[in-house]
Structure formats: C-alpha cells, structure tokens
Amino acid sequence: MKHPAAYIFALAFAASTGAAFADAPKQPDNLPKELLKPFKTWSVRCAQCHNPERVYGTKYTDPKQIEVLIARMARKTTTISKDDQKLIVAYVTWHNKPAK
C-alpha cells in the first residue's frame, strides 16, 4: 500500500460514520403526522453534532427560547437554512412542551 495513513483515515472515517448512523435518533411513537418533516429535519441537521439526550434533556420549553437557541446553532453552520430553523423549532417546541 502506497499511503497507509490515507487507508487508516478512511477506515476511521467509515467507522465513525457507521457509529453515527447506529445512534440515529428514534422517532417518538406519539409524533403527530404534521411533525414528521420537522423531526426528520432535526434528526439530520442537529443529530450531526448533538446526541438526542442533549436536546431531549433540555431545560428550554418556551418557544421563544427555543427559537433563539436554534438561530444561534444555525449561525455556527451553513447546513441549517431559515426554513430548516422553522421546522426544527416546531419539533423541539413540541418535544419539550411542559408536562400537564
């Protein structure tokens, strides 16, 4: 093999990518149909950097707080569009609604 370092990098990348897919967030059983697209957007955009517990265990329940938080995260990356932000806010707001 001419470039063993490249082989090791490719192997490590493949392993880390596989681990990310294995830890993909599970869709909540009680997810309303209108939140299917927001959930998928959240799972693709946010789960790249955050494990589900980071979002699910959050202290944010106020929609305005969630909106500010998602906007801050979107500024850190180029992969979250304004439309994605709206979808993500909708999902996280639903998921983190206070218990009644």
Image (cartoon, rainbow, N blue to C red):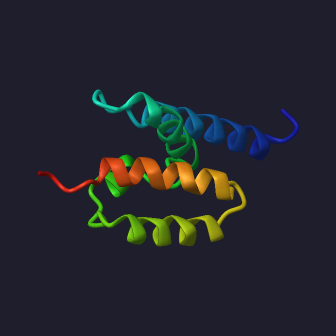
Quadrant showing the N terminus: top right
* 11, above or below 98, in the image: above
Horizontal and vertical percent for residue 6?
78, 43
Look at the image and tell me whether residue 80 can be seen.
no
Q: Residue 45 vs residue 35: left or right?
A: right
Look at the image and tell me whether residue 9 can be seen.
yes
- For image coordinates 26% across by 66% down, the residue present is 59
- The mark tally for this picture is 0
Q: Which of 51 and 75 is in front in this view?
A: 75
Q: Residue 17 vs residue 5: left or right?
A: left
* 38, above or below 99, in the image: above
Q: Residue 76 vs residue 64: left or right?
A: right
Residue at the far left: name it. 100
Horizontal and vertical percent for residue 50?
45, 54
Horizontal and vertical percent for residue 81?
69, 56
- For image coordinates 56% across by 68% down, the residue present is 71
- For image coordinates 56% across by 54% down, the residue present is 86
- For image coordinates 29% across by 27% down, the residue present is 29
